[in-house]
Amino acid sequence: MPSYSHFPRALVARLGACVFIGGAVFLAQAEAPGAHINSIKLKVNIDHSANCRLSLSASIEASEMGTVWYRFSGPPGVEFDFGGEGTKTLQFDRFFGAGRGAKFTADIHGVLRVEAAMIDANGQSGVELSDSVPADYTCGNGSAIARVIPQLPASKPTLHPAPSRPALPPAQRRPMTVPGAFKPSRPATVPGFRVTEVKVSQYTSNFNGSCPTDDMLFRWTVSTDGPGSVLLRFMQESRPIRVETLIFSRRGTRVVNYKPTHMGSPGGHYQGWIGIEVLSPNPVPAAHEGYTMQCAPRVK
């Protein structure tokens, strides 16, 4: 297999303006013909099963089938499993997940990044896209579990009380009313309310039959330490599917189901993952459920 170790330099030389949007970098020509990367999202988690290790996962979406180049990078001191660079040939879907383990022996500061671009028959590409997350972790002498280096909170401005107004005589006081006011039926969220765990439960991991199908079922459990509202987002690879609110009346665990409809097409082969991530009260990365589908050919 040919090496693409010099591909990013050639790509940058060919590309035009550099635009920074929300921490992600987009490099693009004035017009980007042909295949290109639509979106990319990087997530980083601490690997609690080994000393000084991180787990990186990237969700990458291409505009069409083809070969995708991608590369993970980080600050000095980070070493990636299997090297930071790779390629992926997309034959059945435009979405895929790429991952790397990362180890280090001392504190690291900077950003962890993943870049991706399409490769055509001439080794050229469309739009290159990169995403990054902060990489501030401590590990001591390399024999401990990695921990996030806490960031000092920004200083708060001094607040000055507003000037007081003279009180009205009792005869002029009127109770304040709000049109259409009502008492909330949801349980009050207790201070410090958190989601403590999100786990993949029983689900349909493999399917072989007629498509489109309604027979795929995905299931998770969500646990909290008290009553309150949990905002969930369902993801298919890097695509958000929908957002849902889960109400807890007390501390405990709830089951969350997702059953997609009209999934797949006759004769198609699909592989990917479905996941949920917690948006509030505290962010929790997506719990993934991988699946494969083999759809029977269309009956003639």
Image: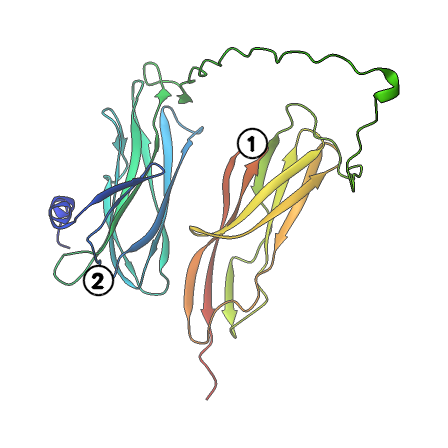
Q: Is residue 145 visible?
A: no
- Callout 2, which amino acid? Pro
Q: What's under tag 1, amino acid-wise?
A: Asn
Give the quarter of the image for residue 278: top right
Quadrant containing the N terminus is: bottom left
Q: From the top left corner, tell me how far across and down residue 129 is, in percent.
A: 28, 47
Residue 234 x/y as whole percent: 54, 49
Horizontal side of 179 relative to 160 (left or right) equals right
Q: Position of residue 242 (x, y in %)?
A: 55, 52
Report x, y in % for residue 164.
68, 11
What secondary structure is marked by label 1?
loop
| Residue located at (41% from left, 22% from top) | 148
Q: Dot 2 corresponds to which residue?
A: 33
Residue located 42% across and 18% down the image = 151
Q: Residue at x 26, y 28 (%)?
A: 78
Residue with the mark numbered 1: 282
